Image (tube, rainbow, N blue to C red):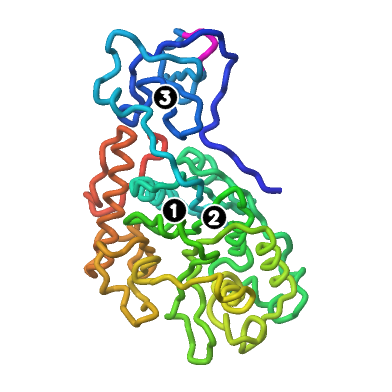
Amino acid sequence: MNLLLLAPVLLLLPAVAGNCECSGASGRVKGHGVRCASWDAPDEKPWCYVDEGACGDSTFEGNPGDFWSHVPCKDVAGGKVPAAAAATAGTTTAKKGRVAIAITLTKDGSGSDYYLDGAAVLKQSMEQTNSAWDVDFIAIVHPSVKTARAPLVKLGYKIYEKKWPFDSSGIQKAHLRETIDKSGCCGMAELIKLSAWEMVQYHRVMLLDSDSLVLHNVDELFDTTWDFLFTYDRNMDGSWSSHPPVQGGFFVLKPDLARYKQLEDTVREGDFREGSGWGGKNVGWCYGGQTIQGLLSYYANFMRPVSESKEMDSAIYNNMASNVNAKGRKQNTVPASEIKIGHFTTCQKPWKVCYKSAPTCQGMFDHWWQARRALETKHGMKPTARCANGAYEPIKMDEL
């Protein structure tokens, strides 16, 4: 059963009649909540910070010491609202629609993995690109994930619990049934990425690994008329193949339940052949080919009309500083000023390596640390020095 949790979870108490006067206080984000306005979404009921107890039962509590009032509310008289905040509060530009960025977790990490830090900075990096779309952040988690859920909700991710509807014993053909559990990083568990096709409430869903970073605005990926955008991993390709495997850490799709069912049925049938991969089409006979890497290449090139899918430039999107794009341009020669989405694979993770000599990696590291410091500043925390004592200091999640 899919479980969708909304964050943060707040307790709403019965409202009372009459307008509740704003106190003029600001939240942790400077200026946030100083006046009666729709702060978080254009269709949200206006609210503001109020003095504790000032509105009787019309207030509800979030973080300790924070009190809000929803409609009805009114701006305070007497100039308590700062002029700068008053000039900008509640002014929003109409968004184009709602899209989502999804990450996946197939298991809880160890104490030194810091993938939650990656998720936090990824979200911050996207938020500071000023997208013209309303963006939700989704964490698709396997039922075995337990300890990571609460921190993800606190970071602002919605939890979407997903288990692939059958295990390997439910695959009809022997070769895939006997090999898929050892394929790639995670075996069949990685197939939960495909559940992004189920999220039909969104115009588009972009799936990213949590060790990714958005360096610049990527609205063109949501504006597209293509149904499926992806990058190839040519490092894992072979001379025998008809098409390279898709790199599973980045793709953008138009949600569609029928296409999700088509992918599910393809795995259940299990027509993955030794030596020639999916459908015998010479696609997917590589590392991870039995799951996401090979299946999505088969999907883009054989299962669906090729007019629905488009390969994106991997020098710009999903740059790993180790691959080449369709024109042979090396990812590790691309400056960070050109990269729109970086993926910390060959460069290693910013929480494992403080600095890299390669210019492309160093540029992506610089952007990651800038986004981390912006996140900490936004929440009233002292920005963390970059490996000041020669070791990575994790984000203080309890202070966010």
Residue 268's disc number = none
- Other residues around mark 2 within 10 Å, as few (<14) / some (14–19) / many (≥20): many
- Image quadrant in which you'd find residue 26: top left
The first of marks 2 and 3 along the sequence is 3
The span from disc 1 to disc 2 (Cα, nearest Å) is 9 Å
Query: In this figure, which residue is indicated by the disc labeled 3?
Result: 37
Q: Residues within 10 Å of mark 1 (few under 14, many from 20)?
A: many
Residue 83 x %, y %: 24, 21
Estimate the spatial distance between the alpha carbons at disc 2 and disc 3, rounded to whole Å: 36 Å
Closer to the camera, 279 or 134?
A: 134
Query: Where residue 115 is drawn, which disc sits there?
Result: 1
Asked if disc 1 and disc 2 are in contact, CB closer than 8 Å, the reply is yes
Label 2 with label 3: CB-CB less than 8 Å: no
- Residue 378, compared with residue 176, is above or below; it is above
Q: Say which element carries label 2.
A: strand
Outermost residue toward the bottom in this view? 240
First in sequence: mark 1 vs mark 2: 2
The magenta stretch spans which residues? 55-59
Tell whether 82 sits left or right of 3.
left
Crowding around mark 3 (Cα neighbors within 10 Å: few <14, some 14 to 19, many 20+) is: many
Decide: is 174 above or below 395. below
